[in-house]
Each structure stands twice: as C-alpha cells, then as structure tokens.
C-alpha cells in the first residue's frame, strides 16, 4: 500500500494559476502487467431486468438499489423505472413531458429513506422533482440552475458540478457549487479556468461510498471527498504507462473540443471509479474509445488491470458493458443482451438467461465482488 506523504506536494486543480497543497493522499496504482486469472477471484450474480411493452430501454445511466428495489434511469434519461430485486418490473415513476412532475432528461436520483422521498434531477430543464417513495406520487418541484451532475451530502446539502463553471460575478469559474436543500448557495469550490467543450464522461461526476460524496472528474487523476466547506483530495490514480494529460496541455490544446482532441493522443480520454469496502474499480478509455477496467484491493494494494476485451475473455462474461454503481460490496455492471444471446457460456447461472432473453431485451445486471 503506497501513500503520498509529502508536506509540500502540489498538484494543479485546473486553475493553472492556482495551486493546491495536498497531504497524505493515497496513491491507487494499477500494475501494467497482470498475469493473474481474475475469473478465480470473483463471484457474480445476474439480474435480467424484465422487458415489457411499457418497459423497454437500451441501457442504464444511473442506478440505485434500496430495500430490495432497483431504481434505474435509462441512458436517454427519459424514464425512471422500478424493479424488484429479481428484476421483475414494478412501475415507472413520473413521465416524460413539460407538465407538473414531468421530466425531459434525467441524470440522477436520490432516495431519502428517512423522509420517504425520491428526488429526480433533470439537467435539461434544470429542475428537481420530488416523489413519495411509498406510492410514487409527485409531491413538488424545484427550479435549479445549470448543472452537469449533482450529489446529496450527509448533512442534507447538495453538491453540483457544471462543466461550464459557476461564477461569483468576477469571472472566476468554479467547478462545484454547494447549496442547501432550498438551493441557496453556500459555497463555490474548485476554482478553474479550464471549462472544456465536449468532454468525455464515461459515468458519473460523483459517486457515494459510506454515505460520503466523492468528486470524480473524468480527465484528471485526483478523486476528492466533497463536504459543504471544502474538497478533500483522497486518491491519486496511477495507471502505469497510460497517463493523464497535464492541466497545461489540456488548457492549451483541448478546451474547445476535449474529447475530439484527446482521443487522437495516447492520453487517457476519460475515467470513472466506484468503491466498495474492499475494492476500488476503475473504468477508463485510452486512445479514444478503447475501454479498460481495473480493480484495486484497498487492504493489500494488489491490483488488476485489463483491456475490457481481455477481461471478457478471461471471465466468460460476453456482453459485459459498463460500470454503473455498487450494492452490498458488489460492483454493478450491465450486460448487453444482443451480445450475450449469440454467445456460448460456461457460467451455469448465465445459461438459463441466454435461453430466455431476446436480443432487444432490457440489459442484464452483472454484480461482481471478490471472494
């Protein structure tokens, strides 16, 4: 286990003119050479999400599993669907439109078990929609402001991220805004003069672990814990020979078209991570859309890193697609039914699923944890 313990260690926060002092940041290092057969180290569960005439979608953008119910936003953001833990469809919450309680493009959801509410975030209409968690009826809406993603903090406040930056009126954009539940601004965080157009965002800009919120900007290697008062640098990602572009290079070369520019280089195009009690999982793209996956043991420092195609060959998880979240120490991935349907598998649990699915069915959830 390696730690970065340099009292004067400095990294850029994409302000290029401002520096941030960082102490005791844990380095998450993924080895270039992985010779271990990961198939023998993991265990998998599979949940095929039921397909009906009123419940048909291509892939998942956001997912939350609470009290044995699966809440999913589809990739296009126009449905919030509820399934039981076996994958049986229960209902849709709200509907797409411009009326009260109707949304256009959802990109996040938050479940408050204490208040028994589910909140949907619509980044197209800049609104929050609150529904009753028991009967799924619409309760109220709130008009927000521009945002790319949001996350609820343990103290009830909300963290908002926006690629274009939030301003104080002094032309000093900040990537993060903290508000209370009534959307009153508390603080702006992460000052930056890098406001990219067309960034590649493989997943979420925030993730939660043990009720804490973490900021996961896709084109930098630092992961921050988010509080109402500050960002706390927590992890520094190292991917061996595969590197992140420097802040200076990004500012000079990629602000107008981040993905279009960086995808033509050897730099990492984008990354996202999720975290369980024992492991960190990273999904990242290099040289454009060449997908990779890695796992890091938080207790031993052991790591595994693969091209996703090699990971699929080793595990036999044909149709294995993208990292979506976590649940009870499992990492949640989706599997695409069209690829899975036409495959042969040696995994006993997948055989009945392959026999029963159709190529245009809803995705299968693949839950992975280490033995």
Image (tube, rainbow, N blue to C red):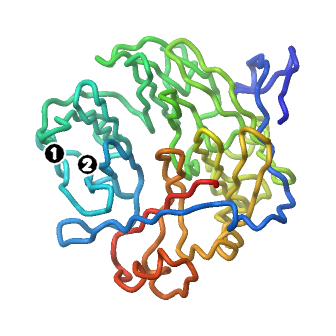
371 relative to 227, above or below:
below
Q: Choose top left, top right, bottom left or bottom right for residue 89.
A: bottom left
Q: Quadrant of residue 293?
A: bottom right
Q: Nearer the viewer, residue 363 or 229?
A: 363
Q: Position of residue 73 (x, y in %)?
A: 34, 52
- Number of numbered discs visible in the structure rendering: 2
Q: Residue 329: percent from the left, percent from the top?
A: 54, 45
Tag 2 residue: 104
Within-10-Å neighbours for mark 1: few <14, some 14–19, many 20+: few
Please state if 371 lies on the left or on the right of 213 as rendered. right
- Vertical placement of residue 147 versus 153, above or below: below
Look at the image and tell me in which quarter the N terminus lies: top right
Q: Identify residue for label 1.
A: 98
**Mark sitting earlier along the chain (1/2):** 1
- Rounded to the nearest angstrom, the CA distance separating label 1 from label 2 is 7 Å
**Residue 71 or residue 353, whichever sits in front:** 353
Q: Residue at the spot x=38%, y=45% of the render?
A: 64
> Pointers 1 and 2 in contact (CB under 8 A)?
yes
Where residue 119 appears, as percent x and y from the top left, is 27, 35
Front one among 339 and 123: 339
Which label belongs to residue 197?
none
The quarter of the displayed image where residue 357 is located: bottom left
The residue positioned 53% from the left and 39% from the top of the image is 205
Q: Is residue 218 left or right of residue 115?
A: right
Measured along the vertical axis of the image, is residue 341 above or below residue 39? below
Tag 1, which secondary structure? loop
Give the image location of residue 35, x and y in percent.
84, 65
333 relative position to 312: left or right: left
Q: Residue at x 34, y 83 (%)?
A: 356
């Amino acid at each position: 286990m390696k730690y970065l313990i340099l009292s004067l260690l400095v990294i850029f926060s994409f302000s290029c003119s401002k520096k941030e002092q960082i102490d005791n940041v844990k380095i998450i290092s993924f080895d270039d050479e992985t010779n271990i057969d990961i198939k023998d180290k993991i265990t998998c569960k599979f949940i095929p999400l039921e397909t009906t005439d009123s419940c048909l979608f291509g892939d998942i953008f956001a997912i939350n599993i609470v009290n044995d119910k699966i809440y999913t936003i589809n990739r296009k953001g126009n449905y919030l669907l509820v399934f039981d833990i076996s994958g049986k469809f229960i209902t849709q919450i709200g509907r797409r439109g411009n009326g009260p309680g109707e949304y256009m493009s959802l990109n996040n959801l938050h479940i408050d078990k204490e208040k028994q509410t589910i909140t949907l975030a619509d980044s197209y209409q800049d609104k929050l929609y609150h529904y009753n968690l028991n009967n799924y009826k619409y309760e109220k809406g709130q008009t927000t402001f521009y945002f790319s993603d949001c996350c609820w903090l343990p103290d009830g406040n909300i963290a908002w991220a926006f690629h274009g930056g939030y301003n104080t009126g002094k032309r000093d954009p900040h990537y993060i805004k903290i508000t209370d539940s009534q959307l009153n601004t508390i603080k702006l965080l992460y000052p930056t003069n890098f406001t990219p157009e067309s960034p590649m965002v493989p997943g979420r800009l925030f993730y939660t672990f043990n009720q804490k919120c973490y900021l996961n900007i896709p084109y930098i290697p630092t992961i921050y814990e988010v509080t109402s008062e500050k960002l706390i640098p927590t992890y520094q990602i190292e991917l061996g020979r595969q590197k992140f572009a420097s802040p200076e290079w990004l500012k000079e070369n990629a602000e107008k078209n981040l993905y279009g520019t960086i995808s033509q280089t050897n730099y990492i195009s984008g990354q996202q991570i999720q975290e369980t009690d024992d492991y960190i999982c990273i999904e990242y793209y290099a040289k454009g859309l060449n997908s990779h996956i890695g796992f890091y043991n938080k207790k031993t420092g052991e790591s595994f890193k693969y091209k996703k195609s090699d990971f699929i060959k080793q595990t036999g998880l044909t149709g294995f697609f993208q990292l979506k979240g976590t649940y009870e120490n499992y990492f949640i991935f989706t599997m695409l039914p069209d690829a899975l349907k036409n495959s042969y598998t040696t995994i006993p649990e997948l055989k009945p699923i392959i026999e029963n699915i159709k190529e245009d069915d809803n995705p299968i959830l693949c839950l992975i944890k280490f033995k």
